[in-house]
């Protein structure tokens, strides 16, 4: 509790105590009966409501003003971030047309494009996180199989793993951006903790989305800790280790049951039960 809130609370409690003493003296002087009790209680409640409203308005108005200023500043920063991203993408596209015969230059431009896409994705995630803090994110209807294909295609551009897809049509109604973040996180983990050129199986059947890798796997002790914030399997790896904690939080919010099975040096299988969010295909 900060000092300002503490002082306001102390003032409120003190004022109520004074009123109670005054109420007691009023009853002691005029005698206790139904009429005097009701009059005293009405005065006490009215004063409490008015004084409480004034205190809350004073405290919350400053908080709202700070939040509003912070939101305005954040929007300006996000806008400024979006401009250089768009500029890089536009100029990269122009250079690719100009340097069609220069293979090395095209490779470098490809790396720039990949990094720009990553930056753009981070920008989108930042906007999403801010919007989620301000108000509830609207849910959308979309086909999971189509979304999975699109994101796997992006992962395949890294030329690291072989993805084997077996997807059946499935439409759900959830926070789409959050679902995309969760999916990217699971696909990235499957790649990160498996050997280069190893197979990653992605299946969508009977309302269950499964991502299975043949990576380093986990033992029972590690499985217990995977949803802890900042936990990482490989402490030498780059990253903040908050991925699966966010995945679990999203699944809980959207009523998606997540189950992770793993075996050390064999691999990991992640099952997402979409039964509670599935809609009829139209």
Image (cartoon, rainbow, N blue to C red):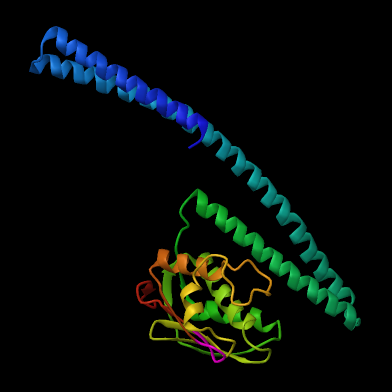
Q: Is residue 180 above or below residue 220?
A: above
Please tell me whether residue 120 is drawn above or below residue 78 in the rendered image: below
Q: Is residue 197 magenta?
A: no
Residue at left offset 46%, top offset 31%: 6
Name of the residue lying farthest toward the top: 29
Q: Quadrant of residue 257?
A: bottom left
Residue that protrudes farthest toward the front in the picture: 221
Question: 63 or 139: which is nearer to us?
Answer: 63
In percent of the image, x 45 and y 54: which residue is there? 136
**Residue 74's x, y, as percent?**
64, 47
Q: Nearer the viewer, residue 149 or 179?
A: 179
Instruction: Find residue 14 and report its horizontal and vertical position in percent.
Output: 36, 22
Kindly identify the residue that appears in the image at 51 percent across and 51 percent down.
Answer: 133
Looking at the image, residue 144 lies above or below residue 252:
below
- Residue interval drawn in magenta: 263-269
Q: Name the residue located 30 percent from the left edge and 21 percent from the top edge.
A: 17
x, y percent for residue 240:
63, 66
Which of the image's four quarters has the C terminus?
A: bottom left
Give the image location of residue 130, x and y in percent.
56, 52
Q: Nearer the viewer, residue 136 or 200?
A: 200
Q: Within the image, what quadrant is residue 192 found in? A: bottom right
Q: How many marks?
A: 0
Q: Is residue 185 left or right of residue 270?
A: right
Quadrant of residue 155 in the image?
bottom right
Along the viewing direction, whichever of 108 and 280 lies nearer the viewer? 108
Q: Name above or below for residue 191 compared with residue 93.
A: below
């Amino acid at each position: 509790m900060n000092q300002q809130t503490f002082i306001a609370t102390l003032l409120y409690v003190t004022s109520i105590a004074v009123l109670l003493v005054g109420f007691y003296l009023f009853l002691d002087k005029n005698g206790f009966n139904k009429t005097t009790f009701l009059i005293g209680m009405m005065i006490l409640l009215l004063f409490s409501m008015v004084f409480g409203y004034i205190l809350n308005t004073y405290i919350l108005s400053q908080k709202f003003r700070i939040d509003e200023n912070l939101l305005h500043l954040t929007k300006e920063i996000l806008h400024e971030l979006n401009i250089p991203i768009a500029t890089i993408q536009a100029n990269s596209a122009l250079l690719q047309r100009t340097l069609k015969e220069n293979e090395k230059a095209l490779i470098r431009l490809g790396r720039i494009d990949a990094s720009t896409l990553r930056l753009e994705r981070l920008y989108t995630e930042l906007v999403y996180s801010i919007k989620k803090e301000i108000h509830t994110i609207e849910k959308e209807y979309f086909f999971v199989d189509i979304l999975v294909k699109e994101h796997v295609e992006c992962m395949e551009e890294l030329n690291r793993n072989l993805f084997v897809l077996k997807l059946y049509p499935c439409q759900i109604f959830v926070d789409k951006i959050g679902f995309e973040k969760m999916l990217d996180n699971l696909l990235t983990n499957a790649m990160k903790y498996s050997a280069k050129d190893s197979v990653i199986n992605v299946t969508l059947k009977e309302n269950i989305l499964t991502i299975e890798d043949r990576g380093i796997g986990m033992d029972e002790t590690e499985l217990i800790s995977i949803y802890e914030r900042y936990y990482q399997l490989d402490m030498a790896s780059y990253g903040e280790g908050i991925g699966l904690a966010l995945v679990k939080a999203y699944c809980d919010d959207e009523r998606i049951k997540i189950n992770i099975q793993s075996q050390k040096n064999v691999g990991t299988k992640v099952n997402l039960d979409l039964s509670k969010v599935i809609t009829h295909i139209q």
